Image (spheres, helix red, strand yellow):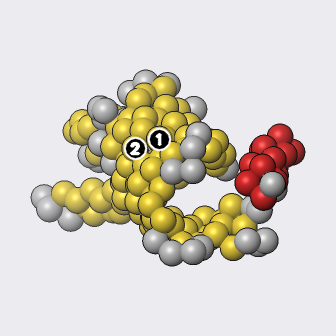
Amino acid sequence: MAVRIGLTRAISLETGISQITRRFDVAFSNDTNGYAVSDKVRLVGYEIPVLAMVYIRLGRDTWMNNALGVSADMYPSDAVRTQDFSRVYMARKNWISPGIVANIGFEYRSPKSGWFYLGATYHRPFGNIARAEYTWYDRSAFGTTVFAGIAGSYLTADLRYYFHNDPDKSRRRKADTRNRGGDQ
C-alpha cells in the first residue's frame, strides 16, 4: 500500500507499508562423503519508506517521476530450515534497520480511471539484514558451522495502479475562483 501527498504540482511525498518476502537458495555439499543437498529459505520483512518525488511532464497525460528517500525495514522473526544432516538459521541483525530507496518510473494519468505506473526501484539497507549460520552434521552428529552476512539489497520492476481521486472541495473552490476572477 502506498500513499502520495502532493506538495506542489511537481513534488510529492510518498509513504506506505510493503511486505517483502526474500527467498534464498541454499546448497550444501561435501565431496569427501558425497553428501549434497539444496533447499530454499524464506525471510519475511516489512518496509515503511518515506520518499520525496519529483515529477516531469512528458505529455498531456504522461509523466516521469524520480524518487529518493529512506526506509524503515522490519523483520518480525528469524528463519530456520532443517534437513537430515544440515541446518540453515538466518538470525535478523536488528528488529528494525534503516535503508535507502531510489526509484524511477513512468505514469499514465487517465482523467477518470486512475494512474498506471511502470518503473524500477532499488533498495539498499545500510548494513547486513541478517546473519546466516550454515551447519552441516556428520554421521556422528558433530556439527561444522559457517557464518555469512546477508546484505539484502534488491532491484524490482514495479507495476502499480493508483485509484482516481477527486480534488478536495477547498482546492476546487480555489481553482474556480481563479478561473472566475480572470473572466470578469
Name the kind of residue labelled 1 in the image: Ala
Q: What mark, if any, has residue 52 been given in the picture? A: 1
Which residue is depicted at the point 26% across and 37% down? 149
Residue 64 in sight: yes
Q: Does residue 36 sit above or below 178 in this rendering?
A: below
The residue nearer to you, when weighing 146 against 48, is 48
Q: Is residue 28 left or right of residue 174?
A: left
Which residue is depicted at the point 41% across and 54% down? 66
Q: What mark, if any, has residue 132 been given in the picture? A: none
The residue nearer to you, when weighing 121 against 136, is 121
Q: How many marks?
A: 2
Q: Is residue 176 left or right of residue 44?
A: right
Name the kind of residue labelled 2 in the image: Leu
Q: Residues within 10 Å of mark 1 (few under 14, many from 20)?
A: some
Question: Which residue corresponds to mark 2?
Answer: 68
Q: Where residue 144 sits: x, y (%)?
A: 23, 38
Which residue is depicted at the point 41% across and 30% down? 98
Q: Where residue 94 sits: x, y (%)?
A: 43, 24
Q: Residues within 10 Å of mark 2 (few under 14, many from 20)?
A: some
